[in-house]
Image (tube, grey):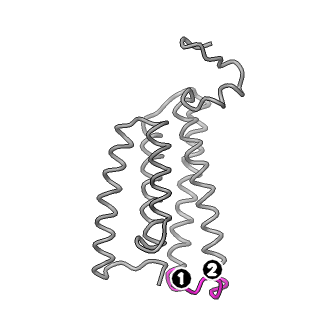
Amino acid sequence: MTEDGRDTSNPVSRLADPLAWTLPEKCLLIAGIYLTFTLWYYGVWSYAARYPDVAPYLDPTFLPTALRVQTLTIIGWSATILFALLARWRGTEPPTLLALTVVLAMYELIYGSHFFGLHTNMFGALTIVASGAVGWVLLDRRVVNSAAACLALAFLALGTMEQLGHLRSAVR
């Protein structure tokens, strides 16, 4: 039992209360969700690269870039999961784990929104709102607020560069 009356001896009751999770457990959840979507989109990009008629609105010359970025992101999330598992096993809560998780999530939100087109799809808006909601509930709010401000600036810069013709995305 904790000081506030929560039963932590039963693993199922601990699972039911994510607010009581340790930082590594919270980062594992976030990294697991992001890795799942990253693997999914890697599969989608790979399929579209092999069968361009499936998604004629995608620029086939951009897909190799998308696949390289997805591969690096899969490696990043896998490393984050390993780091979180190690921290959980050791019983530590390294601040670098939180920073790594948040920075990698921001990186994926920025490039994912750019790849799909800032003005052509709801990927960015829905994913960013969901990520913010989870982040504000589970993580240090100062870190999430800083990430939100950085995202806003990044999207302003991306939108400006896209409108000026300096960036291309996967969407034609």
What range of the chain is rendered magenta?
48-62
Residue 64: x %, y % from top left:
54, 78
Of the residues shown, which amino acid type is indicated by label 1? Leu
Asked whether 92 or 15 is in front, the reply is: 15
Above-or-below relation of 170 to 53: above
Tag shown at residue 159: none
| Pointer 2 residue | 48
Tag shown at residue 58: 1
Seen at 42% across and 62% down, the residue is 110
Above-or-below relation of 162 to 136: below
Label 2 to label 1, Cα distance in Å?
Answer: 8 Å
Above-or-below relation of 20 to 95: above
Per the image, label 2 sits on a secondary structure element best described as helix
Picture quadrant of residue 49? bottom right
Of the residues shown, which amino acid type is indicated by label 2? Ala
Give the main secondary structure, helix, strand or loop, of the magenta stretch. Answer: loop
How dense is the environment of label 2, judged by Cα within 10 Å: few (below 14), some, or many (20 and up)? Answer: some
Residue 51: x %, y % from top left:
67, 85
Seen at 29% across and 59% down, the residue is 153
Q: First in sequence: mark 2 or mark 1?
A: 2
Q: Is residue 53 magenta?
A: yes
